[in-house]
Amino acid sequence: MDHTVLPADFVLNNAFRKIFLTKSYDITNECILFFSCSVSDAIYTRKPKFSTKLQFTEIGLCKLFVKNTVDELATVHECMITCISS
């Protein structure tokens, strides 16, 4: 099995290694999958909600990023529709 750990999951992986008193990345990766607590998955599911809030904010600095946010939301929704249709 590949021992590569995504940067977003590095902290979670280390926490699981301490909880289960193991040095094996394979065991901790299986635990992360079993308990469905991948950081990458959490970010992916929460990002559309955050982007929607950002789109309607009145904060000047955030308004600079509205176009990028709208484009990103469109991409996310398109991917979700494609995944559901498959």
Image: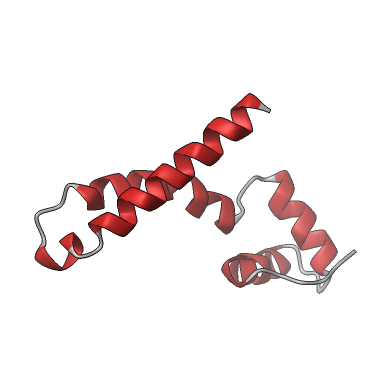
Q: Is residue 51 above or below residue 5?
A: above
- Quarter of the image for the N terminus: give it: bottom right
Percent coordinates x, y for residue 45 in the rendering: 48, 45
59 in relation to 11, above or below: above
Number of on-image labels: 0
Q: Nearer the viewer, residue 64 or 34?
A: 64
On-image quarter of the C terminus: top right
| Residue 80 position by quadrant | top right
Q: Which residue occupies the extreme right position in the image?
A: 1
Q: Residue at x 68, y 63 (%)?
A: 16
Q: How is the image coloured?
A: secondary structure
**In front here: 82 or 42?**
82
Q: Residue furthest top?
A: 85
Estimate the x, y position of residue 60 in percent, counting from the top left. 10, 65
User: Residue 58 lies in what quarter of the image?
Assistant: bottom left
From the top left corner, tell me how far across and down residue 18 is, in percent.
69, 70
Q: Residue at x 66, y 68 (%)?
A: 6
Residue at 75%, 63% in the rendered image: 20
Is 67 in front, or is 26? 67
Residue 8 locus on image (x, y percent): 57, 67
Q: Is residue 46 above or below residue 8?
A: above
